[in-house]
Image (cartoon, rainbow, N blue to C red):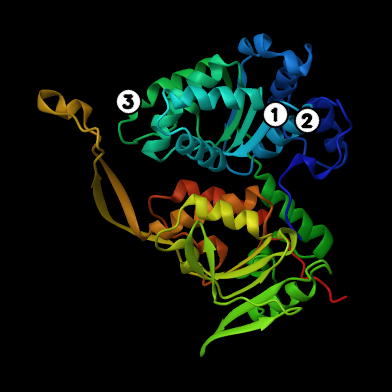
Amino acid sequence: MAHSNSASSQSITPMMTPLEVYRAKVSENLVDDPAQQQAVLALDMLFKQLMPQPYSARHSHSQSTKGLYLWGDVGRGKTFLMDLFFDCLPSEGKLRLHFHRFMARIHNALREHSGKRDPLTLIAKNLAKECKVLCFDEFFVSDIGDAMILAGLFECLFEQGVVLVATSNIPIERLYENGLARHRFLPCIQLLQTHTQMLHLDGNQDHRIHAINTLLNNEIGIDSAEMSASISRNIGITGTLDFEYIFDKLVNGLTPNTLSMSAVGISDSGIRETSICGSRMSNASLTICNREIPVIRAAIGPTDNAVAWFDFYALCDGPRSQLDYIEIASRFKILMVSGVPKLGGEVKGWIRARGTEDGTGENQAATTGERKLSYAANDDPARRFISLIDELYDQNVSLYLSCDVPLSELYQGGALSFEFRRTYSRLIEMSRHELPKNN
């Protein structure tokens, strides 16, 4: 049921190099992309630089080893290639996280080390003990707190000999572009430029859309022109099936080890509950990050079998953060979201944003954190929706999505047009679902 965005979806023979694995996949009908070939060669070279010494004793060697920063447009295979490299490495001494999860982990560690002297150094040393190769996906800095943390953290990590491999949609020099107090982030940019090789995947092929087109042509028998009609309103569902029906099919199709599951829902007349095997829930909300989030229906059981159906506004409006989506993705392997509206829209104007580091006196104009931002009416929920999809995609959560408009019209312009291109591409890739059959 779950989509797979990892190179590990197929077995890798122990100690194969990234180049060998890539060539094997090309022989299995992977599109042979010249831009990807250049990235694979760079990853293969890095892999071989990391291999000569015993993996547990590579500290001094890794200090002189440059990592890799892969950037490019959506769907170019950056995550696939990084995961291919990661899977080739020995099992010990490596860590792979989505950037949001990485930052959530750092914030938790900072709370744990609150009051201690130089907590970033302590955190970096602990990370270096855990891994000598750090891979994270979707490097994109938009939060001023993250920006201030990263400059100090990367300095400590690189001093500890950690090798970084990262993916992003933008080059290093554009990270945190137009951010508050960006001058304080510039040392982080310089560190990344010094300690990683930046490589642009500039191919013209969106491999996610190519893959779904191939599926539709070869397996289903419809051409790409019909693709939008088949998946535009319900991700993975042809037509406009009732979500009540879909939920029941999903729950009934779950494996037998869900013996302690409960199902709860909300009807038009109020709260209703059903029970499976005698276990019941007391209300129609879930506690996520110590806050109650309304849920339309949910089947709560082992994580691999848990299903939840939320309204869009319950997930993407109001006080929601990346931490909420991290917990949701860890608790549910199937997520249903209904009532997704048209997002973005006409840019209504500018807001003048200021930071707390504004200058004073005669240097105020030069050091102010003030800048203009455009916004559209639905950009706030759209930003949260982007974060939600990123987390579900990274954690291989199956998604059933009911939208008011076709996917191609879901974001109507605004400040997030660039970011939403990645979301659209990922939604296309996540669109292959089959309802479970009754046993």
Indicate which label's residue lies in the foreground, 3 or 1.
Answer: 1
The secondary element bearing badge 1 is classed as strand
Q: CA distance from mark 2 to mark 3?
A: 38 Å
Please tell me which residue lies in front, 207 or 204: 207
Q: Quadrant of the C terminus?
A: bottom right
Instruction: Residue under label 2, please give it.
Output: 91
**Drawn side of residue 314 relative to residue 200, left or right:** left
Element under disc 3: helix
Kindly identify the amino acid type of the residue bearing the numbered disc 1. Answer: Lys
The spot of residue 33 in percent (x, y) is 73, 34
Residue 183 disc label = 3
Q: CA distance from mark 1 to mark 2?
A: 7 Å
Is residue 389 visible from the viewing direction of this image? Answer: no
Residue 339: percent from left, percent from top: 52, 72
In-front residue for pair 233/271: 271
Q: Which mark is residue 117?
A: none
- In the picture as drawn, the residue positioned furthest to the left comes out as 361
Q: Residue at x 77, y 11 (%)?
A: 53
Circle 3 crowding by C-alpha within 10 Å: few under 14, some 14–19, many from 20 = few
Going from N to C along the chain, the mark reached first, 2 or 3, is: 2
Q: Is residue 127 left or right of residue 355?
A: right
Q: Nearer the viewer, mark 2 or mark 3?
A: 2
For label 2, the crowd category at 10 Å Cα-Cα, with few meaning under 14, some 14 to 19 and many 20 or more, is: few
Q: CA distance from mark 3 to mark 1?
A: 32 Å
Tag 1 and tag 2, C-beta contact below 8 Å: yes
Three-letter code, disc 2: Ser
Q: Which residue is mark 1?
A: 94
Quarter assignment of residue 67: top right
**Rendering quarter of residue 34:** top right
